[in-house]
Amino acid sequence: NAGVTQNPKFQVLKTGQSMTLQCAQDMNHNSMYWYRQDPGMGLRLIYYSASEGTTDKGEVPNGYNVSRLNKREFSLRLESAAPSQTSVYFCASSVEDRFNYGYTFGSGTRLTVV
Amino acid sequence: AQSVTQLDSHVSVSEGTPVLLRCNYSSSYSPSLFWYVQHPNKGLQLLLKYTSAATLVKGINGFEAEFKKSETSFHLTKPSAHMSDAAEYFCVVSGGFNTNAGKSTFGDGTTLTVKP
């Protein structure tokens, strides 16, 4: 039982390059989330998907796009990476967005933009 | 509106002594409150949660937290620290059990160091 799987685990990009962060969960959860973690700032929500077929902006959506490919998979795309997007990105899932049972997190993607 | 404040950015204890990590919150609604732990280079793991049932909540690895509405606090405690408890801890608030999980607010984290 893998839980939430993120790929890649590490990535270095040049300014202006694009990339997609992959996330998949095998717990049959309805809701999925993308967070970024910066030192001393806790976690900030980028985008979330309450259910398959829906996506919504979080606190810091600028510079990102998402796709809820199916119930299992939720990808995050950086179209033109900027140094300010250097961060650790976490994908999370929960049973239902309507009721807060808590999250299950992946192990993160450490992204550096140079 | 809601917010969460972790009162200490760093806490250092000796192995075998008690742990206290402090969290205050504000919320317009009856809140749900959570503590997560993050070990180095790992994702966050749910330690425990309060969702308007018993005010004293027991979690994994011997941790517990008490919801005190009058003090708007949800402090995390453990009677005896273990070396493996060294990690970063996050307090999280949301507007209530039936409030969207995506509306959660994370604290800035408390780094716990355990000395031998």
Image (cartoon, coloured by chain):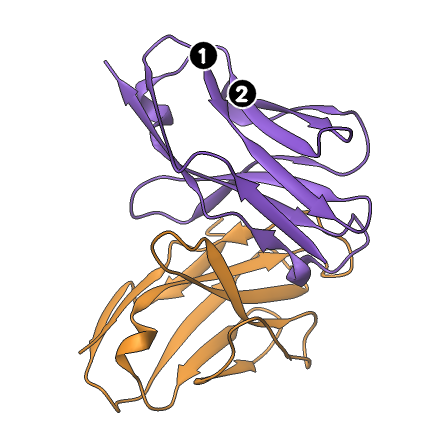
> Could you tell me which residue is drawn at 64 percent across and 55 percent down?
B104
Q: Is residue B44 above or below residue B83?
A: below
x then y, percent, for residue B82: 36, 17
In contact (CB < 8 Å): disc 1 and disc 2:
yes
Q: Which chain is purple?
A: B
Q: Secondary structure at mark 2?
A: strand
Q: Earlier in the sequence, mark 1 or mark 2?
A: 1
x then y, percent, for residue A53: 68, 81
Q: Nearer the viewer, residue A21 or A71?
A: A21
> Could you tell me which residue is drawn at 30 percent across and 42 percent down?
B40
- Please, what is the three-letter code of the amino acid marked with disc 2? Thr
- Mark 1 and mark 2 on one chain: yes
Q: Nearer the viewer, residue A92 or A30?
A: A92
Q: Answer left or right for A25 relative to A54.
A: left
**Residue where numbered disc 2 is placed:** B77
> Which disc, if any, is residue B18?
1
x then y, percent, for residue A50: 69, 69
Which residue extends farthest top? B16
How crowded pointer 2 is (Cα within 10 Å; few <14, some 14-19, many 20+) is rated as some
x then y, percent, for residue A36: 43, 64
Query: Which chain contains the residue that carries disc 2?
Result: B
- Please, what is the three-letter code of the amino acid marked with disc 1? Pro
Query: Which chain contains the residue that carries disc 1?
Result: B
How crowded pointer 1 is (Cα within 10 Å; few <14, some 14-19, many 20+) is rated as few
Q: Quadrant of residue A94?
A: bottom right
Q: Answer left or right for B49 relative to B89.
A: right
For the N terminus of chain B, give its image quadrant: bottom right
Q: Quadrant of residue B115?
A: top left
